[in-house]
Amino acid sequence: MYGLTGVGAWKPQNIAAVLYDDIKDLALQPLAHRSLDWSADESFALGAHYVLEGSSLGARVLCKQVAALGMTRDHGARHLWAQAETSNWRAFTNALNAHEGDDAALIAGADAAFGAAAASMERAAHA
């Protein structure tokens, strides 16, 4: 399950390709990023995916906001639309609720994902 294979009906969505297309659309340069240690254990990976899957809920709000800037599902905001249009949240929460692993590792995984996102935002603000 580590990282990218899924649990039960839940399968993680990989938006990397459309994100890079958006970066090209906006004539931006990809920033260096901090990778998570997906091999830590299943509980850690589920905690990290909690953050990633939860971001799809925020993407629904952001799609409306970036439209005013001229970014659409076909230009500049593909990654947001890909996240917003997924129906993974219910399947993910079912997998999370069925998980009987280490709660501390779940929290550590979520914390690591939030930390990586915060560090990326900090780098972007200073780029």
Image (cartoon, rainbow, N blue to C red):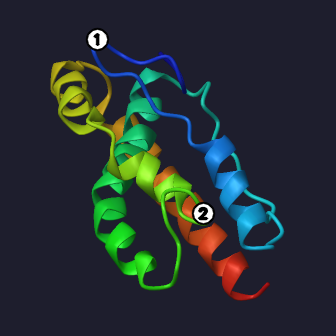
Left or right position of 7 against 27: left
Who is closer to the viewer here, 2 or 107? Answer: 2
Residue of label 2? 75
Measured Cα–Cα span from mark 2 to mark 1:
33 Å
Who is closer to the viewer here, 7 or 37? Answer: 7
Residue 1 picture location, percent across and down:
47, 15
Who is closer to the viewer here, 90 or 122? Answer: 90
Q: Quadrant of residue 43?
A: top left
x 29%, y 33%: residue: 88
* Location of residue 100 with respect to 96 vertically, above or below: above
x 72%, y 73%: residue: 26
Residue most toward the top? 8
x 37%, y 71%: residue: 62
For the question of whether residue 110 can be seen, the reply is: no
* Residue type at tag 1: Gly
* Residue type at tag 2: His
Tell which tag, 2 or 1, sits nearer the viewer.
Answer: 2
Q: Secondary structure at mark 1?
A: loop
Residue of label 1? 8
Residue 91 picture location, percent across and down:
22, 26
